[in-house]
Image: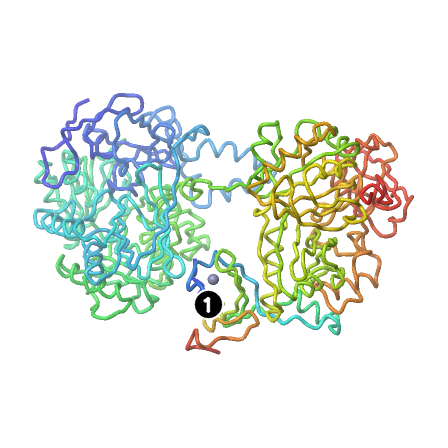
Amino acid sequence: MMLLPCPWCGPRNVTEFAYRGENIARPDPNTADKATWRDYLYYRSNRAGWEREGWFHRAGCRQFFSIERNRTTNETRGVGTPDGAGDAAHSGDSR
Amino acid sequence: MTAPMRLPSQPGEVIDRTVPLMFGWNGRAASGYAGDTITSALAASGERVFSRSFKYHRPRGILTAAFDDPGCTVQVGDEPNVRAAHRRLAAGMDVRAENAWPSLKYDVKAANQLVGRFLGAGFYYKTFISPQRLWPAYESVLRRFSAGGSMSVDARRGDYDKRYVHVDVLVAGGGPAGMAAALAAADAGASVLLVEQEYDLGGHLRYGGAAELATLRELRDRVAAADAIEVLTDSVAIGRYEDNWIAVMQRTAAGVAERLVKARARSLVVAPGLIERPYVFAGNDLPGVMLSTGVRRLINLYAVKPGLRAAAFIANEAGDAAVEDLRRAGVQIAHVADARRGTGLVHATGRGGLRSVRFSDRTVEADLLVTAVGWTAPTALASMAGDRPEFDPGAARFFPTVAELPGGIYCTGGLAGDGSLDELVGHATAVGRAAATRSRVGVAPLPHDPHPALFHGPTDGFVDLCEDVTSKDLATAVAEGYDGAELAKRYTTSTMGPTQGKLEVVNTIAMIAELTGRGIAETGTTTWRPPYAPVTLGALAGRTFEPVRYSPMQPWHSAHGAKPLVAGAWIRPDHYGDPAAEVRAVRSGVGIIDVTPIGKLDLQGPDVAKLLNLLYVNKWSKLGIGRVRYGAMCADDGVVFDDGVTGRLAEDHYLMSTTSSGAAAVWEWVENWLQTEHPEWAVHVTPVTTSYASINVAGPKSRELIARVTDVDLSPDDFGYMHVRTGRVAGVEDSVLWRIGFTGELSYELHVPGAFGLHVWETLLREGADLGVRAFGVEAQRILRLEKGHLIVGQDTDGLTRGFSAGLDWAIKLDKDDFVGKPELVWQGERSDHPRLVGLATVDPQLVPPEASQIVAGGEIVGRVTSSRMSPTLRRSVCLAQLADRLARPGTTVNVRLPDGRTIQARVTDGLAAVDPDGKRMRV
Ligand SMILES: [Zn+2]
């Protein structure tokens, strides 16, 4: 079971977290066409390698945050705030 | 029972001769000493056969005299598959042989030997592949021949425990290297968990000579004195997962049957020692053929003479030491064949036990044959960490590739290389010190000593003694094209038995390599997967801790015959004996229901209305103070997610209610949108589901009842339908009352501070006695709301039901600037070919189609009944259904297919409500 570094609580078992998936911006609901909206709802890159993702520390501080995770090795870096802005202060190794 | 094979006291023996133990062996009385294993006690009394083999039912005896001994699995009482060469003897044990019928001595199924050629490689695949319809018949026959003991469904072994450990260094293996590594890590300031699979620390030192025993005593004393080292014996690290999350199976743990220890370690030191590898030749499974380590364990740990007249086939110092032990134990040495000088072992013969051994230069009579031909490196934990072990042909064993090990993984002891005891301890000390700081500093690699590569003789024998796989089977597999290690393993099942390949894997690979003309390094190794050692399912399942929630009114419910209903984490009263009577009480007088599980969120701040506008499909900007509104939530795919009412208590203070099952999800949903999309909004969210006890008081007499317990003005002009008030109820301050009507009746929902819930409940029942007040449960509430046509999200909707299919047309406000799910609902509204939520009245009013009955038309499924009950109010069945749009007009007759195959007719009703469609009763 991997450890995930919560920006508020530090490294915790990944089972304490809920995975929210790749960070995807919500399109403007008044101008988005169907294709855009379906991409937002259902399409994910599933790239191997580094990806910025959203996580929720459900069994901890109940905070949403984003972090970069290497999907091949499970290394993490650049833990940040919910809106996806990486916080370099938490990691010297930022994309 | 006599003990003809018991030796006089040995310097390292672990038995306590002052504590004799009586036990049963196949129904006969047997005895041993405390400290004996089941096998050693029986071997001391002269027993040589402990089981019948898996496929051919051949007699099997002691091979390793340790946990992984393939021939020593027995039934103890109601516990099957006990490792008799490991399990310590206890007084009164009822030990029986497994896999033998009618007896160990005369096993009928041994006839399998005579038809052995039919049970070769791929036997099951080839023989039972067709016709497939006969599989059930094949299976029932095969099952009778399968291995394993018997299970009792009534068996009780106590609780299985779990424990969580955080340590700096976990050392897997408590031999000399493991102990030295643990000591060095502790000296460097680390906390250490030292895990040893035997009952005592020491590894091979335990069955060594005087020098080894002296070193053992010294290391054990130092470990015992080190406060930072916790020792778990009879415990195995069974798996290593990411970030050094290590599962340790503690087989002996005080107070519980077994314990699964979940350890998180900064560093893992893998120090399992080496496993002695058997030799493959005809007759290699005869009782009396033993490994040198097995012989040394029997003599030195248990003071058991392994045989009377021994032959030996040895290629290393462990073999020399075993022969020396045999001499000292007074065993006659018939012949020692030294493989280092080129002597070969041809075959062994005997019936029921070893009688004679044929070497390349002579034949000798013997009842014991000791082999010492090499070692298998248990690289399992390193492999699980990503290491790919490499075969060193000169040393004739695999080694972990130290350069490839990820950070925080270390190997030491025999796994890492060779050397004198001092050199191994020195290496382990350097490793322990490095592990404490998670560095690689100061660790020089150990050399690999040369060792002859000996895997098999010139005759065919058993490669896998658990699965009865022979070298001939491997040859067949390769000839049929299964020429990779993983393929041949699956085809023959070699290495797939209870020892998990610990004894067999290298021989299997070596023989495949030879048969295919490749080297061992090219043929590769098979993957070691968790668990490294067998684990009981009980240990994995553990004790179930399932927290349940009860409302503060539970004492009253249980005292009044409430039938419990499990609703998520909650246990609620389903009814109190007669749900129909409960319904009638609500319709005609007044009833009260405990609705504490309803989710409640306290929302405060200037931007709450913005939040509500975003999450609900309807509008919230104009909700006045003191007002309550129904709201439905959709996700961004337009699917209905939850519903409930929210009331505005003050300028910036709202109380939101959710469905009982959605309470946790809605709390997370609200936080999600606030934290990720609108962190600029000032809203503070507090979950208050259990802070309040909630009671719905429903029925035409509910106002009269509430008036007796509150000073809040209840006059309909002041406190109308869909209004909220705060005040005192039954003397309890800070109570919230909202006037809503899920049941379709005049009703007040009370939310009172949780600690006063029972008091308020009992006050209502007392004060309303003359009004005929009656408690009602979830079942009556479900009937009441169904009569009224109020939907339940998740019951009348499913994971695909979007807003306009849930009868929410009146609530969805597409002219709002934004809300979650808006685009999908816009598009759904444009098409209007979606299923609709409708009411159904069966043509035969006494038929209640079960929920989930299909509605069919023209051979197609066009809908389903989502809710159905007999209505005590109307004395006919009432239903809600999801129905195709083209059939959803009121008055349309549809066909409902019942589970018993009958088809009945039902008519679509005008609106969802069967009782009081105009909503007059709840608005009075
Ligand atoms: Zn946290």
Give the percent coordinates (x, y) of residue B338. Answer: 14, 50
Q: Quadrant of residue A11?
A: bottom left
Give neighbour class at mark 1: few <14, some 14-19, many 20+ (Cα, 10 Å): many
The part of the image, by quadrant, that contains residue B83 is top left
- Check the image and tell me how it is coloured: rainbow
Instruction: Please tell me which residue lies in front, B394 or B482.
Output: B394
* Front position in the image: B536 or B498: B536
Q: What residue is shown at x 75% (from left), y 31% (from top)? A: B585
Q: Is residue B450 visible?
A: no
Q: Does B752 sit above or below residue B869? A: below
The answer to whether the residue bearing label 1 lies less than 8 angstroms from the nearest atom of ligand 1 is yes
> Can you see residue B265?
yes
Q: Is residue B426 left or right of residue B632?
A: left
The amino acid sitting under disc 1 is Pro
Residue at numbered disc 1: A7
Q: Does residue B236 appear left or right of residue B798 in this picture?
A: left
Q: Residue furthest front?
A: B711
Which x, y percent locates residue B629?
Answer: 74, 54
Q: Position of residue B98 (x, y in %)?
A: 36, 31
As displayed, is residue B776 above or below residue A37? above
Check disc 1 and report its element: helix, strand or loop.
loop
Query: How many numbered dots are placed on residues in this image?
Result: 1
Quick check: B507 left or right of B545? left
Which residue is found at the position 57% from the left and 72% from the top? Answer: A83
Quadrant in which the N terminus of chain B appears: top left
Quarter holding the C terminus of chain B is top right
Residue situated in front as seen by the camera: B840 or B333: B840
Residue B125 rendering spot, x and y as whole percentages: 50, 44
Q: Residue at x 60, y 56 (%)?
A: B667
Q: Nearer the viewer, residue B202 or B504?
A: B202
Chain of the residue under the numbered disc 1 shown in the image: A
